[in-house]
Amino acid sequence: MKVPSHAMMFAGQFVPLVHVNDHPIDDIHALALQVSVPASIEAFVRQQAPNAQRVELCHDKERIVVHRGWEPLGAECKPGPGDEVIAFGS
């Protein structure tokens, strides 16, 4: 997740439920945080709401990939069958 500004990262120090203490320092400096939902919570949601979808987004310099499904997209951000690809305007 790309954080839009240094000010937003700084504000997290004053909000008790928002913090960056458990993120790698290089990610903090790059304003790029890796975020996820624990598998136990995903399993609970799937049980309680069988029609729910997991949506994952990733991007590079050329496009955004929107992946729907319970299998992870992968770190390389390559779209698979059924994934939506949104190209950045030039």
Image: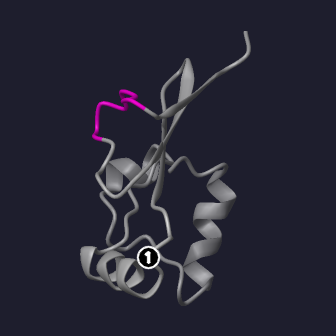
**Residue extending furthest toward the top:** 90
Total residue callouts: 1
Residue type at tag 1: Pro
Q: Is residue 54 left or right of residue 77?
A: right
In the image, residue 61 above or below residue 76? above
Region rendered in magenta: 74-81
Q: Position of residue 53 (x, y in %)?
A: 48, 63
Counting from the top left corner in percent of width and height, residue 2 is at 54, 47
Residue 27 on image: x %, y %: 38, 50
Q: Residue at x 36, y 30 (%)?
A: 80
Nearest the eye: 69 or 35: 69
72 or 11, nearer to the observer: 72
> Mostly what secondary structure, the magenta segment?
loop
The residue identified by callout 1 is 50
Which residue is found at the position 28% from the left and 40% from the top? 74
Q: Is residue 78 magenta?
A: yes
Q: Residue at x 30, y 58 (%)?
A: 24
Which residue corresponds to the image point at 62% horizontal and 53% vertical from the top-left?
A: 6
